[in-house]
Image (cartoon, rainbow, N blue to C red):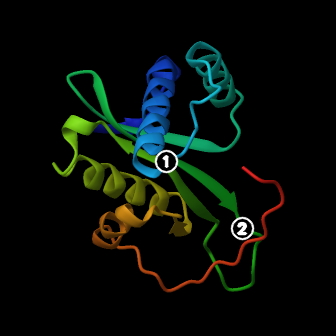
Amino acid sequence: MHYRLAEEKDYPTLAALRWQHAAEDDADYGEHNLANADARAFTQQFTAFLRSGPGYSVFVAEEDGVILCTMAVYTIPKLPAPGHTAQSIAYLTNVYTCAGYRSRGIGAGLLGYIKGWLTQTGCELLFVWPSVKAVPFYLRGGFTPENDILQCTLLPE
């Protein structure tokens, strides 16, 4: 298994995986992500978004040139503070492993790679808002439910 940062050549595949993720959420949670969506238009939108460099680092796990797992990280710079050296915190999102490859340690391996990469960049904290069924994966990956995050919804999804 090879873990790495995604490259521009990967963007169409990442868009297809994001589409598949949305389709699974529709089936699993009764959502309607794809009800009025067009795959071709979404792929164009997704790839343009990643090309614009909005602060996301997308990571992949691949085997024999096939991407099997992807995770995106948004790094948030921290204001300098006296006595602190951490430079950022990060948000983990869009975690997806292809259905036929789950429960094989691929996601855990990619998460470990990402944690190492973030540590080297001076990241203090990695956080995630997981689905209920994903919580055990994150607990095994070293996440703890210690911090309560308050939210203020500004726009409905």
Residue at which label 2 appears:
78
The alpha-carbon separation of the residues under discs 2 and 1 comes to 37 Å
Query: Horizontal and vertical percent for residue 76?
Result: 68, 59
In-front residue for pair 114/132: 132
In-front residue for pair 81/50: 50
Q: Residues within 10 Å of mark 1 (few under 14, many from 20)?
A: few
Horizontal arrangement in the rendering, residue 90 relative to residue 62 (left or right) = right
Q: Mark 2 falls on what kind of element?
A: loop
Q: Mark 1 falls on what kind of element?
A: loop
Residue farthest to the front, as pictured: 30
The residue sitting at 83% across, 60% down in the picture is: 154
Decide: is 7 above or below 70. Answer: above
Query: Horizontal and vertical percent for residue 136?
Result: 31, 69
Decide: is 62 above or below 30. Answer: above
Mark nearer the N terminus (2 vs 1): 1
Q: Residues within 10 Å of mark 2 (few under 14, many from 20)?
A: few
Decide: is 34 above or below 28. Answer: above
Decide: is 28 above or below 118. Answer: above
The residue sitting at 27% across, 21% down in the picture is: 65
Residue at which label 1 appears:
30
In-front residue for pair 117/19: 19
Q: Amino acid at mark 2?
A: Lys
Observer able to see residue 1 = no
Query: Horizontal and vertical percent for residue 78?
Result: 72, 67
In-front residue for pair 151/78: 151
Q: Which mark is residue 48?
A: none
Horizontal arrangement in the rendering, residue 36 relative to residue 108 (left or right) = right
Q: Amino acid at mark 1?
A: Gly
